[in-house]
Amino acid sequence: MSRLVVISNRVALPGENRAGGLATGLLAALRERGGLWFGWSGRSVNEASGALHEQTDGAIRFLTMDLSKADLDSYYNGFSNRALWPLLHFRLDLVDYDRGKREGYWKVNRLFADTLAPRLREDDTIWIHDYHLIPLAALLRERGIGCRMGFFLHVPLPSADLMQALPEHRALFSALYAYDLLGFQTRRDVDRFQSYVRLFAGGSLVDADTIRTPDGRRVITSAFPIGIDTAQIARQARSAVGNKAVRSLRHSLQHRKLAIGVDRLDYSKGLPERFHGFERYLQRHPQGRGALTFLQIAPVSRGSVAEYRTLRSELEQLAGHINGAHADADWTPLRYVNRNYAHSTLTGFYREAAVGLVTPLRDGMNLVAKEYVASQNPDDPGVLVLSLLAGAADELQQALLVNPHDLDGVADAIAHAADMPRAERIERWRVMMEHLQEFDIHRWQREYLQVLEGR
Ligand code: ADP
Ligand code: F6P
């Protein structure tokens, strides 16, 4: 079997508890096959030396590099997170395009290519992840690398018309033609990419899963919905019952029901709408007052980006408003926490919660939805309230599916979930859990690599 080289901006370094689906997903996927994982170290320095940090954990060898503050500002904060992230999440209104930042993005992609090219072997399988590194395969090919290269997009892909609105869109998105395989989270993402290829990037369709590029290459474009390590999460959740933080959460609830939300503090997650939806629940369903506590865990993410700082202060105000208006001397309706937790502790928190609230305005997949389901007690499972606009909704049809913009609908779904009879909860959970057991992260990794490696 050839060596697997995974490349992503974010790397889940040993010992870190970092929020983000890519890090959780790839760590679980790589544990099985092993390989080299290359990316940013997570550190910024005044002058980058180009030195690499090396660590090993089991079968995974981590190779990371620091980036200079200036490079990080244009490549990560600027182009990746202020132009591409909002565009890919259908938020043209938030796109802040700047030519200098775009140049910085290409510069760091070239730096990655220059650093990697001399370290690659002819028969390596190269798997590149997410929107930070779209041009990397093209840049590696320019440096003479002929290996099989695949790309996986963890976030959604918007319609061709939105993609067209990005200045120089064709130079960026047609760089994807250098890959052998392009993987997306859902079939709808594949369809939207194919329609962009036909309408704006000079390519054509060969069959449902293959495109022909303007220079005649064939590239496979397919959906590979990412999964979780279902068995491991279920095990962790079972044993987390005795975890100190979990016991202390349980004790603090004083027999009240718990609703939980766990999301990076990101505008795609629909947090203000969720807070409003929870307040609407308290207004429309007064039996919930004093009987249900909502815990929102939202670790700060991309704190140097203006839109994220604005969102943070908006949420602080809203949390204060909701508690001010609805709390009692012995009950706080909304607990709002910005910290990171060990993954095993989170699974214990999920298991304590009668309601899991996952209501993004747009999400490629949303692993939290899947983790919540996998963590439940089979004899007394909680109920997932899930946004129709998350990729996970395609697979988790037994959740209570809501439109996150419809506050009354979210409010009623919380009430429905909190009061659902046990037999119905078990039946809904069982179907979703069977699906998650079958389509777990190991299968995702195997299926992707089988197609990429032509096995
Ligand atoms: P995204 O990739 O957009 O952040 P996902 O829901 O797909 O969204 O993935 C989020 C991942 O981050 C999940 O694996 C979740 O368990 C993890 N996570 C979220 N919040 C925290 C936190 N406070 N501490 C540790 N891990 C977290
Ligand atoms: O899963 C989507 C994603 O954008 C990943 O690419 C990223 O690692 C994660 O969210 C968390 O964001 P960041 O790496 O910017 O902290």
Image (spheres, rainbow, N blue to C red):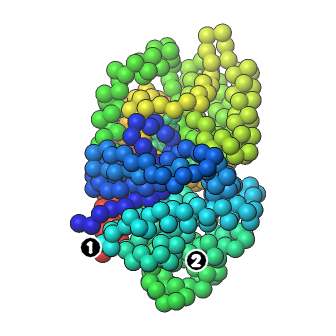
Tell me if residue 245 can be seen: yes
Kindly identify the residue that appears in the image at 73 percent across and 71 percent down: 167
Q: Residue at x 66, y 34 (%)?
A: 275
Q: Amino acid at mark 1?
A: Arg
Label placed on residue 26? none
> Which quadrant of the figure has residue 109?
bottom right
Residue at position x 61%, y 10% from top? 330
Front residue of this view, candidates 41 and 440:
41
Numbered badge on residue 174? 2
Query: Which residue in the protein does label 1 denote?
Result: 455
Residue 100 screen position, x and y as percent: 73, 63
Looking at the picture, tell me which residue is in the foreground, 427 or 37. Answer: 37
Looking at the image, residue 122 sits to the left or right of residue 189; the answer is left
Crowd class of label 2 (few under 14; some 14 to 19; many from 20; radius 10 Å): many
Q: Position of residue 297 (x, y in %)?
A: 56, 32
Q: Is residue 141 left or right of residue 378?
A: right
| Local secondary structure at mark 2 | helix
Amino acid type at mark 2? Ser
Determine whether, in the image, residue 271 is placed left or right of residue 183.
right
Earlier sequence position, callout 1 versus callout 2: 2
Counting every numbered tag in the picture gives 2
Instruction: Assign a secondary structure to mark 1.
Output: loop
Determine the image quadrant of residue 337.
top right
Q: Position of residue 163 (x, y in %)?
A: 66, 70
- Foreground mark, 1 or 2? 2
Q: In what quadrant of the picture does the C terminus appear?
A: bottom left
Distance from label 1 to label 2 (Cα)?
27 Å
Q: Quadrant of the N terminus?
A: bottom left
Are there few (<14), some (14-19), or many (20+) residues within 10 Å of tag 1?
few
